[in-house]
Image (spheres, rainbow, N blue to C red):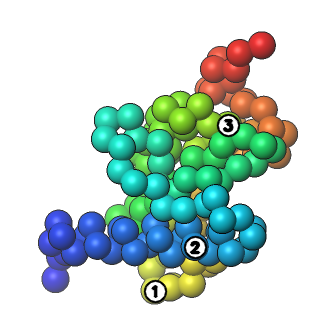
Amino acid sequence: MARSRASAKKAGTAFETSIARYLAQALDDDRIERRARTGGKDRGDIAGARVHGQRLVIECKNTCRVALPEWTNEAHTEAGNDDALVGVVVHKRTGVTSPGRQWVSMTVDDLLALMTGQRHGHRSVDVIA
């Protein structure tokens, strides 16, 4: 049976909350939390995540249908809205409930940004010297 809009929203909220709590506990950082919806200038689902002292946008998806190009574009837009170093996607792994065993997807440029602390490729033009 397909999810209703209400059940999908509830599942999404629960997934976002579990990821935020897991990250906050694992990193011992009480600034990490599920972000309230902000409308047209969305800044991701998880607030307070940082890498190299810069903001990290995390977009969460709890669905069986994988749409990486769409999700990655959304994470990049939200990273721009938040002036974040990078935006990544955390998505539900079918049949797995543990937050630490969910999938993370990103571009290679995003991976380079995480490794170096500097934007690369398609987002490097956003860097202000």
Q: Give the Cα distance between marks 1 and 2.
A: 20 Å
* Residue bearing mark 1: 95
In the displayed structure, 117 sits above or below 2; it is above
Taking 3 as reference, is 14 left or right? right
Across and down, in percent, residue 20 comes to 56, 67
Residue furthest out toward the top: 129
Determine the image quadrant of residue 32: bottom right
Depth-wise, is mark 3 or mark 2 nearer the camera?
A: 2
Q: Secondary structure at mark 2?
A: helix
Asked if the residue at tag 3 contacts the one at tag 1, i.e. Cβ–Cβ closer than 8 Å, the answer is no
Taking 64 as reference, is 79 left or right? right
Residue at left 62%, top 37%?
84
* Residue bearing mark 2: 21
In primary-sequence order, the first of circles 3 and 2 is 2
Please name whichever residue, 24 or 58, is drawn nearer the observer in this view of the structure: 24
Taking 79 as reference, is 52 left or right? right
Amino acid found under the numbered disc labelled 2: Arg
Quarter of the figure that contains the N terminus: bottom left
Q: Secondary structure at mark 1?
A: loop
In the displayed structure, 34 sits above or below 44; it is below
Quarter of the figure that contains the C terminus: top right
Q: Which mark is residue 85?
A: 3
**Total labels drawn:** 3
In the displayed structure, 47 sits above or below 12; it is above
Across and down, in percent, residue 111 comes to 72, 46
- Does residue 69 appear in this view? no
Q: Give the Cα distance between marks 3 and 2.
A: 22 Å
Amino acid found under the numbered disc labelled 3: Leu
Please name whichever residue, 23 or 88, is drawn nearer the observer in this view of the structure: 23
Q: Secondary structure at mark 3?
A: loop
Q: Give the Cα distance between marks 1 and 3.
A: 31 Å
